[in-house]
Image (cartoon, helix red, strand yellow):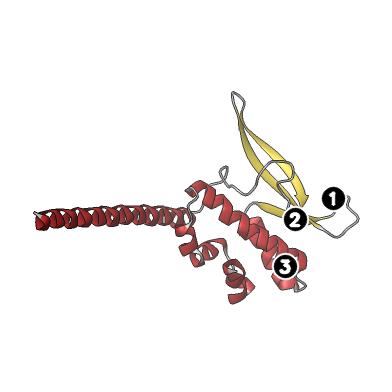
Amino acid sequence: RKIKSYFESKPALEWSYLDFLKSLRPYCVSEEHSLDDQQAIWRKRYLTFLSNVLEEEQDYDIKERVTFLLRQEGCRPFRGMGCRSSALYFTVFSAVAQPGEGVVLLWVWGVVPRCTRCGVSFLQKDHEKRSSEEESFWDGVRIEKELMIKEDIFDKKSQVEALDVLCVSRSQKAV
């Protein structure tokens, strides 16, 4: 619901991945997945929503903006590929490290939103340099999560200490 509300609350020209992340920051902080998993999960949710918009939307300007955003995230939409339908396809480039052979660039295409049907995921941008703003966002999420953990530990220690004081007080009172 929150994902949909982000896209519904803003005009298509204002959509961006970083703004999407910022609007969902409380959810990013509260999830229990590792930071790497979260980055992939939230990117997948963003791209999946955009892919669905691209398939269902009738407005040319919105389709143009969504195509731009998908390209920005490493996808290249194009029509055809010998298919009779008017489905949009995506060319996805993914770098795969192979021991002793260096990095190999794979070219994968698929029907939206199943760009991962060949097993190569474009949902993680490990082979690309993340923008400094995106890195800063995820660093902030990591720091906030660490702070929440420390606060939780402190609260639990405080509760244990309070119980210890109560137990000592009761035992002294009983004597």
Is 95 rendered above or below residue 90?
above
Say which residue appears at 71% left-offset and 72% top-offset: 61
Q: Amino acid at mark 2?
A: Val
- Figure quadrant of residue 174: bottom left
Label 1 to label 3, Cα distance in Å?
A: 20 Å
Residue 7, percent across and down? 61, 71
Please tell me whether residue 17 is drawn above or below residue 11 in the rendered image.
Answer: above
Q: Which residue is mark 3?
A: 63
Q: Position of residue 166 (x, y in %)?
A: 18, 58
Residue lying at 57% horizontally and 64% vertically, measured from the top left: 16
Q: Residue 42 location in percent, x, y?
A: 57, 56
Residue 81, which numbered label?
A: 1
Looking at the image, residue 57 lies above or below residue 71: below
Point out which mark residue 112 bears. Answer: 2
Measure the C-alpha gap from mark 3 to mark 2: 14 Å
- Looking at this view, is 74 or 26 the one in front? 26
- In terms of secondary structure, where does tag 3 sit? helix
Amino acid under label 3? Answer: Lys
The reply to whether the C-beta atoms of the residues labelled 3 and 2 are less than 8 Å apart is no
Residue 128 x/y as whole percent: 56, 46
Towards the viewer: 169 or 20: 169
Number of residues whose C-alpha sits closer than 10 Å to that of mark 1, classed few (under 14), some (14–19) or many (20 or more): few
Relative horizontal placement of residue 132, taking residue 98 as reference (left or right)? left
Residue furthest out toward the right: 84
Dot 2: element: loop
Left or right of 158 in this view: 103: right
